[in-house]
Image: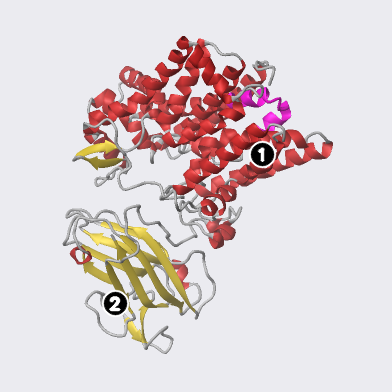
C-alpha cells in the first residue's frame, strides 16, 4: 500500500468493458425487448418508494404522495393498488424509505424531465424518459462502484489476472447481476457504490490527506447512511483500510488538528444527513421518527443459520461465490492483528444486523439481497485468496475453474428465477434440489406451496380464530361441497372429494366480521391431509383463498399449488402446510373462502382441514 496511486488505465478499461456489457444488456432486455413495455417497470418493487420522493417533490410539490400513488396505479393497471412504502404517521402519509437513492438519482430524473418536455411525452415521473434515465443512472452507479473496487484491489497489490477474475465473479457470479439489471431501483446497487466509494476515499486519505479528499470522505459517509442507515457498520472497517503504518485515531487527530479539514468533512456529511429529517418534517411535522411502523429488528433472536445457509434464501446457497471470502480472511497477515480483528468484527456484526430484521429473508427476491451492499468487501477477501493460490500453474488453473463454475451456476439460477422456476420466497431443500440447474420445460412454474412469515406486529402465539373440519358432520362455517363416505378417509368415515366434475373441495366460507374487528389484517396458518386416488392428481390442485368485496367494492383472489414439488405416487395420505398474510380486509360483510380447486381430471380426497387466524 505504499504506492497509493497505481496507473488508472487498467481500472478504467476493465470498468469500461463491464459498462459496455451492462448497458448493452439493459438496452436489449429492458428497452428494446419483446414484449415491449419492459421499460415501464424499471422503477419497480421497493424501488418505487425510494424513487417516489422525486416526482412528489419536483413535479407535484406535494409529499402526501397522493398523485404519485394514482400514477403508479394507472401504470400497474391495478385500481386497488396500495403502495407498501407508505405508512400512516399522525394521520399523514409517510414514505418509510430513506432518501439517499433519490438524491443520487436526482440528475438522471432531471434528464428525464428535460427529454420528456422536448419530445412531448407525459411529464409525470413514470413515462419513458424518466424510466430510461433512472435505469441509466443505476448502471452508472453500479459501474462506478466496480471502478472504486478495482482501484482498491490495485492498491492492495492484487495481480491483474486476479482482479479480472474477481470482478467477473462479482459481476456475473453473484445476485448483483440480477439486481443490477432487473431490480435496478432497489437500494443495493446504490449502497454498493457508496460503500466502495467511502472505502476507496478512506484508503487514499490515509496516505495523504487534503481538503478535497476529506470532503469527499464526508460525502460518501453521508450517502452510505442516507441510503441505508444500518450500513454505518462499515466504520468498523476503518482500522482495516487505513494505511497499515497508521492507526485509526491518526485520521481523526489530523482532522482535529486541521480545523478547516474537519469543517470540510463535517459540512457535506451534515448537509446530506439533514435531508432525511427535513423530509420527515414536511411529511409529518416531526424531524426525528422511526419510519418503519410495525416493523423492526429482533436483535435477541438473529437468524444466522437461515441468512447464510437456508434453502429459502441463504447467502451461500444462492450466491456460493461468496463462500470464497471465508478463507480469504486468513490471507490477512497474522502480524496485522488490528486489521484482522477489524474485518472479523465487521463480518460478524453486519451479519447479525442483517439476520435480526424481523423478515430475515427480506420478502420476495433472488437470494439474500441485503448482503449485496457489502459485496465489494467480500470481493476484496476473495481476491486476497485467489492472489495467494495463483502462484503456481495448478493454483492458477484452480482459480480460473472456480470462477467459471461459479459464474455458470449463478447465471443458470438467475435465469431460473426470472422464469419462475425458483420461487421468490418459499423455497426449501426439496424444491431447491428438484430444480437444481434444470432448464427443461417440466420445471417451469412447477413448484407450489406458500410459506410466508407473519408480519412483525402479528401475535402468532394466540390464534384469534381456529376452524377445523373432519367432514364427519355438517358445519355452518364450511360450504357444502361433496363429502363422501369412504373407508379411505384419514380419520373417521368421511372425507372431502374432488374430481373433474366436483372441482372444488369442502372449504371455509365465513363473513369477515367473524374474524373480529374490521378493518384488519390477518395471518393464516393452514394444514390438511390429502390423498391422491389417482396418482399425480394433486399436481393440478390449487389452494385458493378469496374474498368477495374485500373493501366493499373489489374482490381478491390468490391460488398456489398444494404440492411443493410434483408427485407421482398415489393412494397415500400426506400433509400439506401453508401460511400467508391476507391483505387488509376493510369490509365486514365480505365473504372469505378457503378451499382446494382441482384444475385437472383426476380424483383425490381431503381430510382434517385446519385453519388458524392470527391478528
Predominant SS of the magenta segment: helix
Residue in the picture at 62% in, 37% down: 341
With respect to residue 602, does 264 lie above or below?
above
Label 2–label 1 contact, CB within 8 A:
no
* Left or right: residue 442 compared with residue 76: right
Residue in the picture at 44% in, 37% down: 230
With respect to residue 575, does 171 lie above or below?
above
Considering the image in quadrants, where does the N terminus appear?
Answer: top right
With respect to residue 607, does 212 lie above or below?
above
Location of mark 1 (residue): 329
Q: Secondary structure at mark 2?
A: loop
Location of mark 2 (residue): 481
Magenta region: 147-166
Based on the picture, tell me whether residue 157 belongs to the magenta stretch: yes
Q: CA distance from mark 2 to mark 1?
A: 62 Å
- Location of residue 387 by image quarter: top right
* Left or right: residue 130 compared with residue 343: left
Instruction: Give percent across and percent down for residue 240.
Output: 61, 30
Instruction: Give percent across and percent down for residue 331.
Output: 71, 36
* Front: mark 2 or 1: 1
Instruction: Give percent across and percent down for residue 225.
Output: 43, 30
Q: Can residue 37 be seen in this snapshot?
A: no
Q: Secondary structure at mark 1?
A: helix
Q: Work out whether residue 302 or residue 14 is closer to the camera in this orientation and state it.
A: 302
Based on the picture, tell me whether residue 459 belongs to the magenta stretch: no
Instruction: Give percent across and percent down for residue 38.
Output: 42, 37
Q: Work out whether residue 509 or residue 444 is closer to the camera in this orientation and state it.
A: 509
Q: Can residue 297 be seen in this snapshot?
A: yes
Nearer-N-terminus badge (2/1): 1
Amino acid at each position: 500500500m505504499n504506492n497509493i496511486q497505481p496507473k488508472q488505465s487498467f481500472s478504467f478499461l476493465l470498468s469500461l468493458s463491464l459498462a459496455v456489457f451492462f448497458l448493452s444488456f439493459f438496452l436489449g432486455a429492458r428497452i428494446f425487448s419483446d414484449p415491449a413495455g419492459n421499460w415501464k417497470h424499471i422503477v419497480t418493487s421497493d424501488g418505487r418508494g425510494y424513487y417516489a420522493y422525486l416526482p412528489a417533490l419536483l413535479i407535484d410539490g406535494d409529499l402526501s404522495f397522493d398523485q404519485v400513488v394514482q400514477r403508479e396505479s394507472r401504470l400497474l393497471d391495478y385500481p386497488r393498488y396500495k403502495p407498501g412504502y407508505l405508512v400512516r404517521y399522525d394521520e399523514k402519509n409517510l414514505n418509510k424509505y430513506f432518501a439517499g437513492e433519490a438524491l443520487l438519482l436526482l440528475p438522471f430524473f432531471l434528464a428525464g424531465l428535460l427529454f420528456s418536455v422536448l419530445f412531448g411525452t407525459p411529464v409525470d415521473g413514470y413515462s419513458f424518459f424518466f424510466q430510461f434515465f433512472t435505469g441509466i443512472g443505476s448502471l452508472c452507479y453500479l459501474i462506478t462502484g466496480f471502478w472504486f473496487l478495482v482501484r482498491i484491489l490495485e492498491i492492495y497489490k492484487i495481480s491483474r489476472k486476479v482482479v479480472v477474475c474477481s470482478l467477473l465473479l462479482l459481476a456475473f457470479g453473484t445476485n448483483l447481476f440480477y439486481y443490477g439489471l432487473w431490480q435496478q431501483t432497489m437500494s443495493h446497487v446504490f449502497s454498493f457504490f457508496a460503500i466502495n466509494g467511502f472505502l476507496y476515499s478512506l484508503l487514499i486519505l490515509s496516505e495523504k490527506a487534503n481538503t478535497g479528499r476529506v470532503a469527499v470522505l464526508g460525502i460518501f459517509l453521508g450517502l452510505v447512511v442516507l441510503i441505508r442507515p444500518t450500513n454505518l457498520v462499515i466504520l468498523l472497517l476503518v482500522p482495516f483500510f487505513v494505511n497499515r503504518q497508521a492507526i485509526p485515531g491518526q485520521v481523526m487527530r489530523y482532522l482535529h488538528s486541521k480545523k478547516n479539514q474537519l469543517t470540510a468533512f463535517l459540512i457535506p456529511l451534515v448537509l446530506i444527513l439533514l435531508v432525511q429529517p427535513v423530509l420527515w418534517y414536511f411529511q409529518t411535522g416531526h424531524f426525528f421518527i422511526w419510519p418503519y411502523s410495525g416493523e423492526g429488528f429482533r436483535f435477541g433472536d438473529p437468524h444466522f443459520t437461515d441468512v447464510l445457509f437456508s434453502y429459502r434464501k441463504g447467502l451461500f446457497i444462492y450466491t456460493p461465490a461468496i463462500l470464497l471470502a471465508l478463507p480469504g480472511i486468513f490471507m490477512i497477515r497474522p502480524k496485522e492483528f488490528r486489521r484482522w480483528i477489524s474485518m472479523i468484527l465487521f463480518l460478524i456484526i453486519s451479519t447479525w444486523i442483517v439476520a435480526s430484521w424481523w423478515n430475515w429473508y427480506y420478502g420476495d427476491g433472488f437470494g439474500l439481497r441485503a448482503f449485496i451492499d457489502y459485496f465489494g468487501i467480500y470481493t476484496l477477501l476473495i481476491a486476497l485468496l485467489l492472489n495467494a493460490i495463483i502462484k503456481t500453474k495448478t493454483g492458477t488453473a484452480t482459480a480460473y475453474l472456480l470462477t467459471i463454475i461459479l459464474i455458470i451456476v449463478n447465471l443458470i439460477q438467475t435465469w431460473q428465477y426470472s422464469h419462475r422456476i425458483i420461487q421468490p420466497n418459499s423455497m426449501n431443500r426439496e424444491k431447491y434440489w428438484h430444480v437444481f440447474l434444470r432448464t427443461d420445460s417440466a420445471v417451469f412454474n412447477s413448484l407450489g406451496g406458500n410459506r410466508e412469515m407473519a408480519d412483525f406486529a402479528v401475535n402468532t402465539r394466540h390464534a384469534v380464530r381456529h376452524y377445523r373440519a373432519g367432514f364427519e358432520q355438517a358445519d355452518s362455517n364450511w360450504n357444502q361441497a361433496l363429502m363422501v363416505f369412504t373407508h379411505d378417509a384419514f380419520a373417521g368415515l368421511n372425507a372431502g372429494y374432488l374430481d373433474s366434475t366436483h372441482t372444488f373441495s369442502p372449504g371455509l366460507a365465513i363473513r369477515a366480521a367473524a374474524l373480529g374487528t374490521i378493518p384488519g389484517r390477518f395471518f393464516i396458518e393452514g394444514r390438511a391431509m390429502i390423498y391422491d386416488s389417482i396418482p399425480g392428481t394433486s399436481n393440478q390442485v390449487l389452494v385458493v383463498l378469496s374474498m368477495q368485496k374485500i373493501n366493499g367494492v373489489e374482490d381478491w383472489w390468490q391460488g398456489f399449488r398444494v404440492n411443493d414439488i410434483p408427485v407421482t405416487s398415489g393412494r397415500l395420505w400426506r400433509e400439506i402446510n401453508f401460511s400467508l398474510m391476507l391483505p387488509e380486509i376493510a369490509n365486514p360483510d365480505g365473504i372469505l373462502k378457503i378451499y382446494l380447486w382441482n384444475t385437472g381430471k383426476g380424483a383425490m380426497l381431503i381430510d382434517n382441514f385446519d385453519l388458524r387466524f392470527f391478528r
